[in-house]
Image: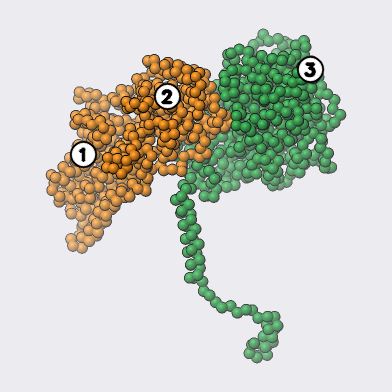
Amino acid sequence: MQNLDSRPAPYVKDQTQEAAEEERQWEATEVKEADHVPDTMQTPDVPPPTPAKDQFQEELVIRPLHSGDIYASFQFRTMWDTDFLRGSKVSHYRLFPKSLGQVISKFSVRELHISFTQGYWRTMQWGQPFLPSPPGAELWVWFQDTVTDVDGAWKELTNVLSGIFCASLNFIDSTNTVQPSASFKPLGLGNVTDQRFLRYAVLPREIVCTENLTPWKKLLPCGSKVPVCLMFDALMKVASSQSFRLSYNTSEVCITPICAMCKSTVWELRQTLNVVFDLHTSGQGKREWSLFKMFSRTLTEACPLASSSKVYVDGELFELSPTTPLLSQAVVLGDRRTYSVYDLTNQATFGQTRSLNMLLRWRAAESGDMLRPLLHGERYVAGYGLQTGEIHTLMYNNHPYRAFPVLLLDTVPWYLRLYIHTLTVTSKGRDNKPSYIHYQPSKDRLRPHLLEMLVQLPPNSVTEVTMQFERALLKWTEYTPDPNHGFYVGSSVISALVPSVVAMDTNSTRECPLFSSFFPCKEESSYFMRVYTEPLLVNLPTPDFSMPYNVICLTCTVVAVGYGSLYNLLTRTFQVEEPSPGLAKRLANIIRRLRGVPLL
Amino acid sequence: MGLLSDPNRRRALTKLLTRLNAPICGMPVDWLVKTMQSRGLEVFTQSFTRKLPFPDENKERYMVRGTNVYGILRAPRAPRTEALVLSAPCSEGNNNNQAVGLLLGLAQYFRSQIHWAKDIIFLVNEHDLIGMQAWLEGYHHTNTTGGDWSPLQGRGGSIQAALSLELSSDVITSLDLVLEGLNGQLPNLDLANLFYAFCQKIGVLCTIQGKLQRNDWDTTSGYSHAAQTMMLMVLKQASGRPWGDHGLFLRYHIEAASIRGINSFRQYKTDTTTIGRLLEGMYRKLNNLLERLHQSYFFYLMPSLSRFVSIGYYMPAFGLLAVILLLRALDLWVQLGASPPGTEDGPSSPGVLSILTPVVISHMTGVALYTLPILSQEMAVQHFPVSETEAVVLTAIAIYTAGLALPHNTHRLLQGEGTEEGWRVLKLVALLYLAVLLGCTALINFSLGFILALSLVPIAAFITPHTPKALSAAIMVLLSPGCTLLYCVFVFQELQETPVSLQDGWMLFLSVISQGILDHALYGSLVYPLLALLIYPCWLLLWNILFWK
């Protein structure tokens, strides 16, 4: 279980699939089966030969969600075959953003993941996202094992990143940083999994807006000048205006070292932007979308720097208006889907009008039943009153017959004093003993609680983890400016290897080679998944900061100052101090004393 | 604020209302689920069962089984940390269909808005307060009164504010705001201000305690009108029961109020659209809140919707009453300290036992009054021709009356005669006990504490064994907690402008007792245990002093 998500898999993949998959998807699911290739399919076999050591790829995936909403995921990948860390300083930057490169070399960062999210991914309505992230800002970093002062580097790094991304990452300090022992493993190359070099922090309160997207966009080589980026630019413009109909958006940056053909280390920078458009507020109930409707713009050309630039549309539920001959099939998150591919590097895609505006119409009025997400989590605070409370975390395993283990990571701030002896894990009414518990108690004003557990979820069940806590009374300067809003507790993280739905499909009528099905265990039989629960808002006992409180504070101050000075005056004894005699006089006095003459 | 300006939407609402006006058997759970889902909400249900300790004859229920339906409107780009609740009770026979229709119409309209920053929960609860109690306990995973409910599937974070909507008639001329909640808790005054401000803005007649505001403050009639409104509020608050579905939210520190549509047969009529606009305005205001409502008062009395009496004004009145008790106690203490030199030894030797016995016995009577009515209802029903509810109430009254015979029985247990010091010590204990009791009660529920202080402080101050027995006994009985309750019933009816005859008043009194016991069993109201376990024994101590031998 230690290596839940660190599978240094050989990075050889078909180009189209690789692009269609999401960042973390490759480590869990390897697609072995040949594509379902129609006659007209022309799959580019290998990436175009790149003389330069860096390359840039961009793509957009559009997926309908069963609630009628639309999920659009932009991804930009920059790869650079260089070494930031050893010997000579890298000074010539082409596609890779210099600001990040310098950060990597200065702080000896091995892996960096940062995400800014607004809204909460509704797993039960939307299914799984390609890349999950918690509301607010999340940052986790693996440092090189050569770093001696990890805490110092982490502090400096958060401050630098705070400047780069115009976010409040500088609020990350020891009270919200943890070192998870098992939940976050390096995704890229490297075999050091010592948690001493890992730092993880979440800021659930961080409010994400356009000012975070602008620096994010500046990291792209094409800036906002060209196609997918262009669209993204439009998106940002609308995002800033009031009339926008987004349900969820998240932007992320991940830097990982990967191996290219496993000959050399390549630095990979992935930037993703995920957006969900709301059907109800924008479409007036009509299940029809177009690129123009979503982004107020159409596609006109590809980024000239990009080695591949594609738009994937999940075509199983959609009728696409300019159809494309290209099809691609991928198993993403345990679900096999067929995507229509628009290659933007190909001029024919844009047609006569020199612009591409896809029209997406739902095939049937009834979109059928959604595949229930196999794993999802929920969290809430139980009880009433301002003294104690109880945190409940619910984990649902919706698989009909397979049990699987999950890793639960809970980070609770110190001002909720957890009673760890009240920790109970129950599923199906029975006690469920976790096989691994890593608990680090909090220290007031220094570090948060960290609880990691490995729990086996029985099939088709709800597992409930409960823990009581006491609300601490803070010092009065420690309250936020809006103390009656409540205090945030970050999302808990549930990581799991989930049995694939594709593997669940025991339908033997599908055409596949007979030799491939001796054993049902396939490479894709399970996939890695991370689920974030909602953050909590907890009210702490708060003094009334209004007039009476101010009056008390003011009176106390006045009394203290007045009484203090008066007391000082009354008790102090005054003495007249003679100025100390000069050096010559003292010498003279010594001589006089020796001689027995009266002193001067 | 363009609610229902769109003809399509108005037509949809009309359709809903006509569908709801058709006679329905119980709550149409499936239909509600489907309707809410089609409006783009996440819909969940919760089923609950509840067996009442004895049948509730007012609402004709004993074994309650029901389902709550609620739909959550997820705010776009919000992380599910905060929520607002709009609820409408719906149950068989209850003619609240207008409210449910309006709730669904609002849900559809709110869904197409984009400015929501908090999730909005639209709740249709069955069996009014019992359903609400089940839902709130399910939401917060507590179980204070032993109900049986299924756990909730969907939540929206911590609830910031809630409104409950009750439109009992098709024609509505004014809206009444109900604030009094469980145990006399009140929501933040800003919620009332918000309601009042929007009513003024939209031009809806709004009332509190069913009474309109008058502008002639200076005149005697205007003053008495305001005083009557405030007295109604005092009586309602003192009863400690939730006066609307909102009442149970207050325990969870959720600001809540009920809005009740009233048909008072005026010319001016308020249509559903106007109420919808009012609610939209209030929810948008609540949606914009960065913090919970906390800036304004939580302790207040309202003589009209736009004016209030704050805690700083009414607390001194109570303080002056309580000071009488303390001064009396001080006086006794001085007397006790001064007398020993005059008399021979042993003033305190009979003390401990002679003081402890009446204290223990009167508290035992209190425990009997608290437990026996419900425990012995079966036996009573077997031997007497009464229903369960009558049995409970009459047993309570019987035990209460039997307590009057105590002084004569207490003395049989005592070895010696009661001494002069004996009753003084007992009275000192009783005075301090009463002062602490009333002080604590007034802090939690001012009205209850004040009413009890008004009736108990005079007798506590003046009672001695040397006063004329018959007259004092009559006064004491007339000022006992039970009789105070009876007067309150009559005064309340008088203030509500529905005076009752003595016979009806007595029936009402009986039903109030049964309701009090039920409120305690169902929602955890503290008034019945307070009266039975603490106030009544305290009164018995004073009764003991009167008959000290």
Compare residues B268 and A381 and report the one nearer the observer.
B268
Compare residues B30 and B230 and report the one nearer the observer.
B230
Disc nearest the viewer among 1 and 2: 2
Crowd class of label 2 (few under 14; some 14 to 19; many from 20; radius 10 Å): some
Residue type, numbered disc 2: Thr
Same-chain check, marks 1 and 2: yes
> Marks 1/2: CA distance?
54 Å
Compare residues B523 and A240 and report the one nearer the observer.
A240
Crowd class of label 1 (few under 14; some 14 to 19; many from 20; radius 10 Å): some
- Point 37% across, 25% down: residue: B269
Which chain's residue wears label 1? B
Quarter of the picture holding the N terminus of chain A: top right
Residue A536 visible to the viewer: yes
Pinpoint residue B447: horizontal percent, then vertical percent: 32, 41
> Marks 1/3: CA distance?
99 Å
Residue type, numbered disc 1: Gly
**Mark 1: which secondary structure?**
helix
Q: In the rendered image, which quarter is residue A178 located in?
A: top right
Q: Is residue B284 above or below residue B434?
A: above
Chain B colour is: orange
**Mark 2: which secondary structure?**
helix
Circles 3 and 2: CB distance less than 8 Å? no
- Point 59% across, 23% down: residue: A282
Q: Give the residue number, with chain letter if any, for mark 2.
A: B272
Same-chain check, marks 3 and 2: no
Q: Give the residue number, with chain letter if any, for mark 1.
A: B403
Residue type, numbered disc 3: Ala
Q: Give the residue number, with chain letter if any, for mark 3.
A: A348
